[in-house]
Amino acid sequence: QVLLVESGGGLVQAGGSLRLSCVVSGRTDGAYAMGWYRQPPGKEREFVAASMWSESSTFYAHSVEGRFTISSDNNKNTWYLQMSSLKPEDTAIYYCAFQQSHDGDFGSWGQGTQVTVSS
């Protein structure tokens, strides 16, 4: 069982930056990937970014590429989503997610953190 806890959300003006954190606890041996998703108001949850656990490869939604960066600390206990040049359309609840194996999916999720970007 893996527990994920996000933090770092808040209110920011358009053009500003925020860094979200996701603390990972529990058994992560052989983990495959971490991801960030978001759910804008009144919309479905959508993919934002993902990284192989080794950070050998990263992936981004087209809407955030070049503005957001996924990374982790050296121990991979904390994962980050650095968000820059924020836009009002980035307003959403942001979730981190954990994928244990290559043939699975993101099976563990955090509780979410609210990001609001004002124009």
Image (spheres, grey):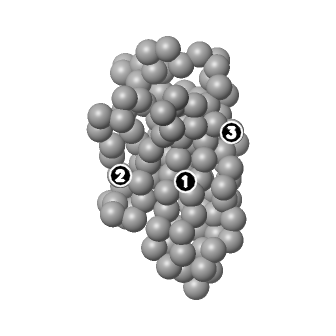
The vertical placement of 91 against 72, above or below, is below
**On the image, numbered disc 3 is attached to which residue?**
5
Using the rendered view, name the quadrant where residue 109 is placed.
Answer: top right
Residue 70: x and y, percent? Answer: 44, 48
Proximity of marks 2 and 1: CB atoms separated by less than 8 Å: no
Residue type beneath disc 2 = Tyr
Residue type beneath disc 1 = Arg
Please, what secondary structure does the residue beneath circle 1 have?
strand
**On the image, numbered disc 1 is attached to which residue?**
38
The vertical placement of 38 against 22, above or below, is below
Tell me the tag on residue 60.
Answer: 2
Residue type beneath disc 3 = Val
Callout 2: few (<14), some (14-19), or many (20+) C-alpha neighbours within 10 Å?
A: some
Residue 71: x and y, percent? Answer: 44, 44
Which residue is nearer to you in this view: 107 or 64?
Answer: 64
Query: Is residue 43 in sight in this rendering?
Result: yes
Residue at 36% x, 35% y is 55
User: Which residue of the protein is positioned furthest toward the bottom in this rendering?
Assistant: 119
